[in-house]
Amino acid sequence: MDFGFKKEEIFLIKEVRAFIREEVTPELVEETRELGAIFGGAEARKFIKKLATKGWLTPAWPKEYGGLAASEMITYMIRDEMAYAELPLYFVAAYNAGPMILRDGSEEMKKEFLPPIARGEVEFALGYTEPQAGSDLAALNIRAEDRGDHFVLNGQKTFNTHTHVADYHWLAARTCFDGPKHKGISIMIVDLKSPGITIRPLITMAGWRSNEVYYDEVIVPKKNMMGEKNRGFYYLMGALDFERMFPPSAYKKLFEEIVDYAKKTIVNGQSLSKDPLIRQRLAQMAIELEASRLLYYQLAYMLDKEMIPNYQSSMEKVFATETAQHICNTGMEVLGLYGQLKKGDKWAPFAGKMEFFYRSSVVETIYAGTSEIQRNIIAERGLGLPRG
Amino acid sequence: MNFGLNEEQRILRDSAHGFLAKECPGTFVREMVEDEKGYTSGLWQKMAELGWMGILFPEQYGGYEGSFLDLAVLLYEMGYVCLPGPYFSTVVHGAITLLEAGSDTQKSEILPKVASGEEILTLAWTETGGSYAAQEISLKAELQNDRYVLTGTKLFVPDAHVAGKIICVARTREPEGDYEEGVSLFIVDGENPGLTVHVHSTLAGDKQCEVEFDQVEVPAENLLGELHMGWPVLKKVLQKASVAKCAQMIGGGQRAIDLAVPYLKEREQFGRPVGSFQAVKHHCANILTLLETSKFMTFQAAWRISEGLSFEKEASMCKAWVSDSYRQLVALAHQVMGGIGFMEEHDLQLYFKQAKTSELAFGDARFHRELVAQQMGL
């Protein structure tokens, strides 16, 4: 066992840290928060293009497609470092679509899409969820009719958060209309500027935007289909093992600010951090963050050993996101009445960040597979319990 | 990072697992609860022959120079079978304290006997205050004619009824503000006529004792470590012992899962396996999450100790997390097992009891969270 990082990993992360310190602007942090940490805004594109020139966006990819052929550990460390710098950016192209193309895409598709993804020039939007297909993804029914060298698409997606800032839709569509639901789905890359696509905003309680996307006779060339026709659901399920990573440090800076607030705030003549109950709560959060960190890096360790972290990635997702909510609840408790003050109010502690995270963290345990779905996976794959 | 055991540790784990499965079935655990001594010399000698007593000691003291991580691997397997007897009190309470503070003479005299299975040790720390805090230490040791005379009462002393040597935490100077000063450690012979030992009746049936020290005379050379400077030693012992205890606890946690899960796959209600119901699955997912996080926290802390890195914060984080998690996970295992797990003849109840006893040993979650808070500068 070894719970430390290697010398070269520590060295690299110092370099990353210095780069971030140099390049991150308040505008970038602000944009990241306003967009709900999705990648695609103007500030983030500028920043990520620079970061990508060092190979740090997709370090684990083969060199021929723009990676560094580095370890997953490096990838995980960089993403956690970014999260700590309040840039917990979520990349669909680099972390969902890209790795799937690497595993299952044609050589032609790899050559066309991977290098620009690795350079941070293009972003995809996940196109999975539909009104009747949330946790039950196989129930999706946006229709893609095969017309020889192209598909014609009709139907609707919802909660597709990236679509208004991304370049391409990473779309799961139905290509077979009879037989088992999960055997008739294909994955395709759709240019979001294609005629017939309408994107309508859905504003969330966090203030950021998600979208409904309507497809009306949209033409998609067949070469944009990823892998084999009707195998899409299997690709998606396989990808879940590899691409659920929730950097534990996304809430670490907020936590540090809460701790700092507790130390500096005097109530009844003594600092809040001297209150035994508050001490217990804050210590508990530090402990949960540590457990979360270990679950996170275990995933990288497994991937580097070519083990498949199937239930482990679900466990990490549940734990990291529930810890995030615990931190928010603890923070609100520590801040008391002040916790409700929004950005812009002159009395708001840490510029209203607490109020914002309390509100936005609600979705953590819902998106990318709810905690309930994750717990099913943990029980079924981790303990071999029978499917219901 | 590397989350896996090395080859030697895997061999140690597998051989310990096989040995203990044979030597320590649930019936043996129950017998030892009733047994006056709480262990058998037969098994004790076999364990000594396997080198388990001296796993941590330098070779010069008859040991195997293993790492703390090796000890953790062994304790994990002992926790898995709920091994009764004075292994923990001898090797962790006693020997670790000796290794931390003992002179070469003291170590040469005692440790080889421990390694060979001839000597049982323990540490008499807590008193009527029922806590590991320095302000609770009031048992007095006074110097009279080159001999220390110890008077007072210790409670919750593990295996004192069979210990050949009891390391006693005593106050040698009245505190002037700082309770951590003026605490000293003494090696007391278990046969000393001034000692009265009474075994508590406890939840898990392990042998924790009330030890009364009535004018117990101890030669001056039995002072362990420096006079008045015992507390810094104890702080280290507390943290190391906490991590060692956690290693035992995660072994027990694994066993709780191994007892519950096969049953949930077989047992049918409403025409389907109980384990296929989502409410049951979610409890199980929580059980596995509590266990795996506990394992990582424990092995990380054990690794830090092995590597000679600072470990205070990680050890307290570990004991706080594992104390809560082990209790919760066994309770959840009971919930999903239903009535059968509540039966005395089912082994799960052993782990329910072990979980609480272990949680209380060396400070519970609240105690260690406070230490974490201090480490955080709160």
Image (cartoon, rainbow, N blue to C red):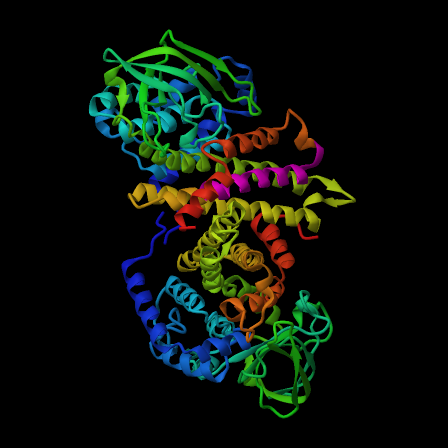
Visible residue check, residue A386: yes
| Closer to the camera in the image, B81 or B166 | B166
Could you tell me residue B170's position as x and y percent? 36, 22
Magenta region, residue range: B318-339
Q: Is residue B91 magenta?
A: no
Image location of residue A125, percent across then percent down: 56, 78
Quarter of the figure with residue B44:
top left
In this rendered view, identify the residue nearer to me: B132 or A114.
Answer: B132
Q: Residue furthest front?
A: A269
Name which quarter of the figure residue B11 lies in: top left
**Residue at the (46%, 57%) spot, across then down:** A259
Relative to residue B234, is residue A208 depicted above or below?
Answer: below
| A134 relative to B4, above or below | below
Q: Quadrant of the N terminus of chain B?
A: bottom left
Numbered circles on residues, count: 0
B300 left or right of B278 in image? left
- Residue farthest along the right direction in this orientation: B270
> Is B50 drawn above or below residue B367 in the view shown?
above
The reply to whether residue B164 is visible in this rendering is no
